[in-house]
Amino acid sequence: MRSILGLTGLRGSGKDTVAKMLLANGWKRLSFGDAIYIEVSEAYGVSIDFLQNRDTKELPLERMALKYCTNLEFVDVFLADAGYKKSLRRALNEDKVLARPGMRRRLKKALSKPLSPRKVLQIWGTEYRRVVYRDDYWREQVRLAIVAEPNTNFVITDVRYPDEGEMLRNMGASIARVSRPGLGGADDPGLQHQSETMMLNYPVDTTFINEEGAQGLAKLEAVVHNTLLPTLAKAA
């Protein structure tokens, strides 16, 4: 039987690092966020590499301002989440010409505000697709990908919600948390979104400690190869 492992943990904790160790052993990577990157890339006309760039992912970028997004439905959801009134958001479409000058100025300012790729991806994935459409919008895509390859070992690198963890467990998966000591803090806005907090107290099957430096990486790799892989193979 094949093995399935879901990884949870704060952004930057090292989930992709663990996944790469499994890929080297013939596993296949999946992510609930893969489709998010594709959709945002198409809506903004930017590359997926641009969205994934670790050097700029947390930084407000002029290119990620809402004025560059072609999906007006998402723009409306983003503005609503940011607290903008419906009267202002209506000016996005048929009422724009009729809007008062002051309202047009406020709308232009809102649409021109630089946003981080991380913020756009978070709102797109949760407040837009999960809330406006359905909460299994992303889960179903991953489920179908796993079902399509019954003999493949899968590692899912971004389990961010309990319902995602439960879906994977119902498919026979184990869930592991990756933790990096000293990561983040209460003043880090990128860690306050529910996609970063919903799994903090979720019960997992094992926890990996990803310490800084070459020694920490070597310890993590030893745990993956000497403990995790034999355990999963035995369970399968």
Image (tube, grey):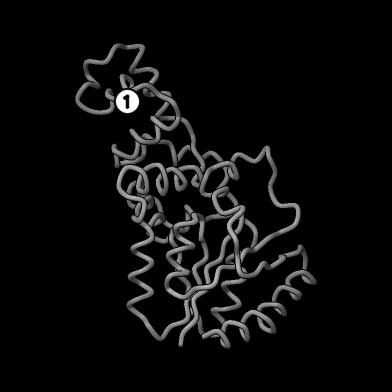
> Which one is in front, 217 or 225?
225
Specify whether 102 is left or right of 201.
Answer: left
Front residue of 75 and 113: 75
**Residue with the mark numbered 1:** 89
Q: Secondary structure at mark 1?
A: helix
Q: Is residue 105 above or below residue 228?
A: above
Q: Residue at x 58, y 66 (%)?
A: 16
Seen in the image, is 105 located left or right of residue 61?
Answer: left
Q: Position of residue 233 (x, y in %)?
A: 56, 87
Identify the residue shown where x is 71% and y is 73%. Answer: 220
| Snapshot quadrant of residue 217 | bottom right
Q: Position of residue 27 (x, y in %)?
A: 50, 81
Q: Residue furthest right?
A: 215
22 or 101: nearer the viewer:
22
- Quarter residue 69 falls in: top left
Compared to 76, does 202 lie above or below? below
**Looking at the picture, how far across and down is residue 117, in whole percent?**
49, 46
| Image location of residue 225, percent across then percent down | 66, 83
Q: Amino acid at mark 1?
A: Arg
Callout 1: few (<14), some (14-19), or many (20+) C-alpha neighbours within 10 Å?
many
Q: Residue at x 38, y 66 (%)?
A: 142
Residue at figure coordinates x 36%, y 34% from the top left: 67
Q: Looking at the image, is 230 positioned above or below residue 70?
A: below
- Figure label count: 1
Position of 226 relative to 33 (above/below): below
